[in-house]
Every structure is written in C-alpha cells, then in structure tokens.
Amino acid sequence: MRKILTIIGARPQIIKSAAISRAIRTTYADRVREVIVHTGQHYDRQMSAVFFEELQIPLPDYNLQVGSGKHGEQTAKMISGIEAIIETEQPDFLILYGDTNSTLAGAIAAAKLHTPIVHIEAGLRSFNKRMPEEVNRILSDHVSTYLFPPTRTSLTNLLNEGFRTDNQAPYTIDNPGVFLVGDVMYDNSLYFSSVAAERTAIVAQRQLSPDNYILATLHRNNNTDEAERLNAIFDAMQTITRTYSMPLVMPLHPRTRKQMDALLTPELYDAVRTNPYIQLIEPVSFLEMTQLEQQARLVITDSGGVQKEAFFFKKPCIILRAETEWVEIVEGGAAILCDADPTRIQNAYIHLLNNDRVDFPALYGDGTAAEQMLNKLLAAL
Ligand code: UD1
Ligand code: UDP
C-alpha cells in the first residue's frame, strides 16, 4: 500500500483534489491510501466546507488552520505544519495543486525532507513574476519529482526551462518525470456537469434566463487591491448591463467584497448596488457554479479556473487580466484579454456575442487525467 499526502488549502485546490480522491476511491483503493492536509488558507464555509460535502472529498486528516495573513507569515506557518506531518506520516509522495501559498509551502517542506513531490498543474506560466502565483509555481516545479502539465503549452514551458520528457524511472528531484495526461479540472467538469443539472437550480432561483446573463468573478490581487483597476472593472460591468439590459450575476470572493467596501467610489458602489441587472451574491458551491457556467451567455473573470471552465462549456470569456497562462483559449478566439480597461471590455463583449465562429477544441485531455496520473505514479515505483 502506497501513501499519498495531499496538500490543499485554497478553494480551487479543494475542487481539483476531488478528481484524484475519486479515482483512488473507485480504482486504486487497494493500492493507495490518501492522507489529506488542509492548510486552512481558505476557511469560510462557502470557500471550503461546501466542497467536501458536495464533491465527496474525504474530510481532511489534518487542518493546520493557518488562515489569512501576509505571504511570509502565512507560508511559514504552513511549512512548519506540513513538515511535522510529513515526519509523522512518512508518505511515498506528496501531491501539490496549482500555484497558491499552500502549494509553495508543501514544496519547500517536502523537498527538504526528500519526499517526492507530485505537481499537478505544472508548467503554467504568465511570464509576470509580480504575480505571487508565478513565483509559487516556478519554485514548486523546480523541486518536483513528478510534473503533470495540463496543456501542450505548459509542457513546452517546462522543456524551455530544462525539463525533459525522456528521463527514465526511477524519478528523483534531479531526474524528474514529466507527463502530459490532461487536466483534472476537465475530469471534474465532465463528471459533475450532469450532477449539477440534477442537484441544483441556482439559475432559476436567481430568476436568470438560460443564455441571457453574464457570469462574473473577480479576485486577483492586482484587480481587487488597486483602486483604479477595481473601479474600472465595476464601471465596465455597470455600463454593459445598463446599455444592453443584460443581467449579470457575480459570486463575490471574500477578498473582493472587502475591497469593494474599501476602494470603490461611493457613487459607483451605490450605482452597482442599485443596478437591477446586477446580482452580487455569496460564493456559490461547485455544482451551482457549474450550472451558472453551463447556462451563461458569456463569462467575465480573472480566475484561472473559471476561464477554463467557460471554455469547457463552450462559453465566450472576457479575461480581466493582461496575460493568461491558458493561452490556447485566447489563441482560438474563445476568450479575449481585456486587462482592466472598460473600452476593451465593452468591445470584447460586442465582438464575442456577435462571433459564431469560435472554436472550442479538446485541449485538456479526455476526462481521465486523474486515473492516468495515478497509473504513472504507481508504475514509477
Ligand atoms: C488565493 C491564491 C490565488 C487563488 C485564490 C483562489 C495565493 C497567493 N493566492 O488567493 O492564487 O487564485 O486563492 O481563490 O495563494 N478570505 C476570507 N475567507 C476565506 C479566505 C479568504 O475572508 O475563507 C479573505 C481574507 O481577507 C484574506 C483574503 O480573502 O486576506 C485573501 O485570501 P488569500 O488566501 O490570502 O488569497 P486569495 O486572494 O484567496
Ligand atoms: N468556484 C466556485 N464557486 C464560486 C467561484 C468559483 O465553486 O463562487 C470554482 C470554479 O468553478 C473553479 C474554481 O472555483 O472550479 C476557481 O477558483 P478561483 O476562481 O477561486 O481560483 P483560481 O482558479 O483563479 O485559482
């Protein structure tokens, strides 16, 4: 029996982990035992607990309850907590997802204890090191033993940084294995899309009409913490909804809710709050989010995960960033990078709604990435 230590902490990591946990439960229960560590980076019910219940993720064996804080303080507490757990559990592998502070903490703790790191979502690059996530993902990739880039572009990024696909087992931190097997987020969206239709009715509950509303999310630190950008984005949403009588629903990340209070001009805040087309709501569950994505006319977001799920469900997307790690989506015309520029956002809105020739090719595997990852890991031992 092999032991995997899984590190999760932020909302998207909890969601991503459902695919591997499900594959272990259905196919590998006799060969793999998963021990789950929640760092506590996200802790509100709607940012954490709701996903365990809904996506049948086993409850964490450990919760470090680190909570929010400055980068150094938060990451340091996580490193120290994860280090102690690795020493107790002595896992065969440590699984890390994505690019959050929880990812980096797991990478530092495990690398120093010589525990092989499995990095799921390796190789993504924005080429903007002012993003905390870019720092986290580069450092994590370079101490990993098993790297799973989700796209061809992310594989190419790794090759450009000196990784190789012809390394042979046994893999080590100095002889890492790199495998292109697809994206666990696509596994999840395929698996849960029919479940969402059966178990949630958020579109009807919110009195939204299918194919006639915008789904928006916002949480990237440069968008929420810079007053000019935050005001520009809400100004654009205000203009679009009013001009085109287009409803917009926006599940608010707690960070965004706090920063709206602090940074939006009182006039704009008031205009947004009294705009009958805009619904600002609490963060929703994954099944609710899936349904909102499936039935939206268009998605506006700065989220990595949400821009990709929009693509999975063949929805055009306005990306509120200057660059993206998911370049294929933009290259195929399904999404447009608009930064925080109201004119670009409005032009993209018009363009995307009037362009039927957008391509949504199968870029993220075949929905079995989690099984293939576990196969690779077990075969490598
Ligand atoms: C983090 C990740 C980001 C990821 C995002 C997913 C880092 C550096 N950033 O950003 O890559 O895209 O998660 O959502 O790891 N808060 C609450 N309740 C919660 C969680 C957060 O109120 O349950 C508030 C706190 O005020 C906190 C702020 O949100 O200070 C930011 O939380 P934090 O985890 O530091 O970063 P995110 O913006 O969530
Ligand atoms: N998500 C959710 N409820 C919400 C907003 C997002 O379940 O209210 C899901 C979304 O479907 C996706 C993931 O959270 O699977 C994306 O996480 P987030 O946007 O927080 O972070 P990112 O992907 O940018 O790191």
Image (spheres, grey):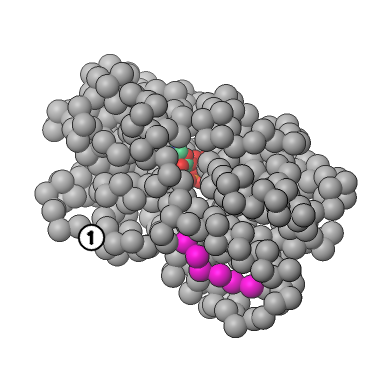
Q: Is residue 206 above or below residue 22?
A: above
Q: In the picture provided, is 207 more to the left or to the right than 122?
A: left
Give the residue type at disc 1: Asp
Residue at image location 57% in from the left, 79% down from the top: 165
Q: Based on the displayed image, in which of its 4 quarters is residue 235 positioned?
A: top left
Look at the magenta stretch and give its main secondary structure: loop
Residue at image location 61% in from the left, 66% down from the top: 376
Q: Is residue 330 above or below residue 47?
A: below
Give the residue furthest to the bottom: 166
Q: Which residues are magenta?
A: 177-182
Q: In the picture provided, is 212 more to the left or to the right than 112?
A: left
Asked if the magenta segment contains residue 181, the reply would be yes
Q: Is residue 179 above or below residue 93?
A: below
Residue at image location 73% in from the left, 68% down from the top: 381
Q: Secondary structure at mark 1?
A: loop
Label 1 Cα neighbours within 10 Å, binned few <14 / some 14-19 / many ≥20: some
Q: Which residue is mark 1?
A: 359
